[in-house]
Image (spheres, grey):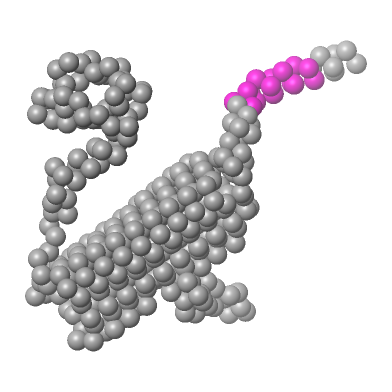
């Protein structure tokens, strides 16, 4: 309607401009816009729309607790900096340090000797196990578990024996972790997520994994132990990575790809096992023709039998 704001960043949506009734549009100066719409000109409409949302909806985190709720259990040996807000039934264990301006939502658990930087958000029911380290401006989504034991066992005559997981998890500044993620502590050393990386919901990061800076990973991806992922990597949904492999900087991994070995190419890989995108598409196209090819082969075999 005329009291609403929209934006145009993807040319595929240009055809609906004539039907759009928004009063204001954020748009590139070269776009032809109906006269009834007020224009906000920008070379990056999507970025400006993001800024507009921040202005129009300043109270995004509705339900943010005020102060420290009386039902919260804060160990006397924990340290809380200025303006920390803690919701109902949160538990903060001994030795934990929570930086200024942090918000800990209802039912979260902050374990022993956990360190949380400034202005972090810890979601409803999230768990940070002992000795986990978070940088500044980290967001952890509802129901995520950071620092549970990695999946490490040794086969013995008596079955599988658990390998003690004595490492930790280190998460750098400006990382965002979605809801329902599991980031396991390392057996020794640290599982690490680099500055500015973003994880979608329902992602498994196994013990000892190293993720670089500004890497984005879509939902339901599973990363096996000790895999090393570079910076500025983009992964689609439901990607699976084998353990102890390396993914180069700047790579794109298509949705549902199965990456079974190290890869470092300029471009995109997809399919199972993951291959360069063009090769994977050719294989997929060939598979769709396989039934017809089998019919032709069978027909040729019949002709050969008759001719012999």
Left or right: residue 147 versus residue 161 is left
Segment tinted magenta in the rendering? 286-301
Q: In this rendering, would 7 be left or right of 199? A: left
- Of 206 and 302, which appears nearest the observer? 206
Q: Is residue 25 left or right of residue 235?
A: left
Quadrant location of residue 40? top left
54 sits to left or right of 177: left
Could you say where residue 151 lies in the image, as x and y percent from the top left?
49, 68
Nearer the observer, 81 or 176: 81
- Residue in the foreground of this view, choosing between 262 and 271: 262
Residue 121 pos. (x, y %): 24, 62
Q: Is residue 244 above or below residue 54?
A: below
The tally of labels here is: 0
Q: Residue sitting at 52 percent across and 51 percent down? A: 240
Q: Residue at x 36, y 58 (%)?
A: 175
> Where, by quadrant of the figure, is residue 281 drawn?
top right
Give the prevailing secondary structure in the magenta stretch.
Answer: helix
**263 in relation to 112, above or below:** above
Q: Which residue extends farthest right?
A: 308
Question: Does the magenta run of residues contain 296?
Answer: yes
């Amino acid at each position: 309607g005329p009291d609403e704001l929209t934006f145009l960043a993807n040319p595929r949506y240009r055809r609906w401009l004539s039907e759009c009734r928004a009063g204001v549009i954020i748009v590139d100066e070269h776009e032809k816009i109906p006269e009834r719409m007020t224009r906000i000109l920008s070379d990056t409409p999507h970025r400006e729309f993001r800024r507009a949302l921040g202005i129009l909806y300043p109270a995004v985190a509705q339900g943010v607790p005020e102060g420290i709720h009386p039902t919260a259990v804060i160990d006397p040996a924990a340290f809380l900096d200025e303006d920390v807000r803690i919701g109902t039934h949160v538990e903060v264990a001994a030795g934990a340090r929570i930086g200024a301006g942090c918000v800990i939502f209802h039912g979260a658990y902050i374990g022993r000797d956990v360190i949380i930087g400034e202005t972090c958000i810890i979601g409803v029911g999230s768990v940070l196990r002992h000795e986990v380290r978070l940088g500044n401006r980290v967001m952890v989504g509802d129901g995520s578990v950071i620092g549970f034991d990695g999946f490490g066992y040794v086969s013995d005559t008596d079955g599988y024996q658990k390998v003690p997981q004595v490492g930790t998890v280190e998460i750098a500044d400006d990382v965002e972790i979605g809801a329902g993620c599991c980031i396991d502590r390392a057996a020794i050393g640290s599982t690490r997520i680099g500055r500015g990386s973003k994880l979608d919901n329902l992602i498994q990061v196994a013990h000892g994994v190293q993720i670089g800076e500004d890497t984005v990973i879509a939902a339901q991806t599973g990363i096996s132990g000790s895999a090393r992922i570079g910076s500025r990597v983009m992964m689609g949904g439901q990607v699976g990575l084998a353990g102890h492999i390396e993914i180069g900087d700047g790579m794109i991994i298509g949705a549902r790809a199965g990456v079974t070995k190290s890869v470092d190419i300029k471009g995109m890989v997809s399919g199972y096992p993951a291959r360069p995108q063009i090769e994977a598409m050719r294989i997929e196209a060939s598979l769709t023709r396989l039934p017809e090819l089998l019919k032709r082969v069978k027909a040729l075999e019949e002709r050969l039998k008759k001719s012999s």
